């Protein structure tokens, strides 16, 4: 079970050159391999080909199970920001009611808010493969959250992967409420999206196994080095193999508390608000938390609530 002879290799290279000429727009590595081995077969028949050593004759043989194509990646390199935009904000509302007729009331309002931030890697330029690439990547320097994560996606144009991270935002405000007044505190949490280009080198090394129906040179099984798919943008590398650069766009959405607005209202108009805390990110599923008041606070004539407002 040897690699192809010089004559067979020369013939298949000529056939491959004809194949890649039609692959300028959508270069799919698996499709090119399939066309290559079938064209190289001539009047023979290809029963199967395998670049991952999954066929039993390969994976059950310790001398052949490593005759496969391996895919590895270099570090992800980020460019400069290409776009910064504002997404729909998250709005938090906290009410404080004072039903006294002659005395004002001072309250300290504090809350820890947990936001979920999203980070998406879009793959836009690549030589297509079904192979799933797992990248251990950090976030760009311009994204303020400190985090490291892993992105995982197929090497096909249009593939993407989204990871999430959380950040806690502390809000606190001292508010004096006049008699017979309801005070409305509105925190607006801006969601800032940044688009940043990224690139990573993808390296393919190894062999493609082909099983012919009729023996060729005394063997059914032949191995072709993956180098045969080399072309412009898919370069030979020292030691054997090919390498290309996959490119895409990273989009990070990061939340930041930006402003507080305080409004005074007549007590009678908003006195019926329930004593509960709710939080709902815009266009997302609401999360509700019931806020338990200390016994001393419950005895006071001043009541509070914290709810969501679009």
Image: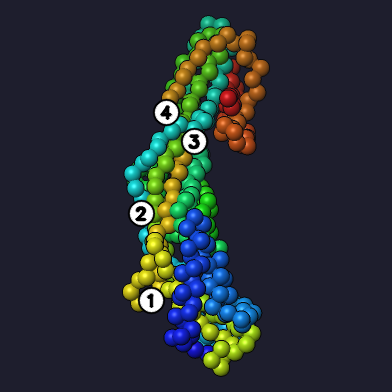
Q: Residue at x 62, y 35 (%)?
A: 286
Q: Is residue 197 above or below residue 220?
A: above
Q: Which residue is under mark 3?
A: 112
- From the viewer's perspective, tell me whether residue 280 is left or right of residue 205: right
Callout in the foreground (1, 2): 1
Callout in the foreground (3, 4): 4
Q: Earlier in the sequence, mark 3 or mark 1?
A: 3
Q: Earlier in the sequence, mark 3 or mark 4?
A: 3
Q: Earlier in the sequence, mark 3 or mark 2?
A: 2
Q: Earlier in the sequence, mark 4 or mark 2?
A: 2
Cα distance in 3D space between marks 3 and 1? 55 Å
Q: Which disc number belongs to residue 258?
A: 4
Callout in the foreground (1, 4): 1
**Are there few (<14), some (14-19), or many (20+) residues within 10 Å of tag 4?**
few
Q: Position of residue 171 (x, y in %)?
A: 45, 30
Q: Nearer the viewer, residue 232 or 144?
A: 232
Q: Which residue is under mark 1?
A: 240
Q: Quadrant of the C terminus?
A: top right
């Amino acid at each position: 079970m040897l690699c192809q002879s010089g004559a067979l290799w020369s013939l298949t290279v000529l056939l491959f050159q004809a194949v890649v000429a039609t692959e300028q727009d959508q270069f799919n590595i698996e499709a090119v391999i399939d066309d290559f081995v079938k064209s190289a077969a001539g009047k023979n028949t290809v029963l199967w080909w395998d670049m991952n050593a999954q066929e039993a004759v390969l994976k059950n043989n310790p001398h052949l199970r490593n005759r496969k194509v391996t895919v590895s990646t270099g570090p992800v390199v980020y460019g400069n920001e290409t776009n910064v935009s504002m997404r729909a904000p998250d709005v938090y509302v906290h009410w404080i009611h004072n039903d006294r007729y002659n005395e004002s009331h001072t309250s300290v309002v504090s809350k820890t808010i947990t936001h979920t931030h999203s980070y998406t890697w879009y793959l836009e330029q690549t030589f297509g493969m079904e192979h799933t690439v797992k990248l251990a990547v950090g976030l760009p320097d311009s994204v303020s959250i400190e985090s490291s994560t892993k992105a995982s996606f197929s090497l096909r144009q249009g593939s993407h992967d989204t990871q999430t991270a959380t950040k806690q935002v502390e809000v606190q405000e001292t508010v004096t409420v006049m008699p017979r007044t309801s005070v409305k505190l509105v925190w607006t949490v801006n969601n800032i999206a940044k688009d940043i280009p990224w690139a990573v080198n993808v390296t393919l090394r190894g062999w493609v196994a082909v099983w012919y129906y009729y023996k060729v040179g005394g063997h059914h099984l032949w191995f072709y080095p993956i180098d045969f798919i080399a072309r412009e943008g898919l370069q030979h590398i020292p030691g054997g193999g090919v390498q290309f650069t996959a490119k895409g766009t990273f989009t990070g959405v990061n939340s930041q508390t930006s402003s507080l607005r305080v409004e005074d209202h007549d007590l009678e108009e908003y006195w019926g608000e329930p004593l509960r805390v709710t939080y709902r990110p815009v266009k997302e599923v609401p999360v509700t938390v019931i806020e338990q008041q200390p016994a001393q606070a419950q005895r006071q004539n001043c009541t509070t609530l914290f709810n969501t407002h679009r």
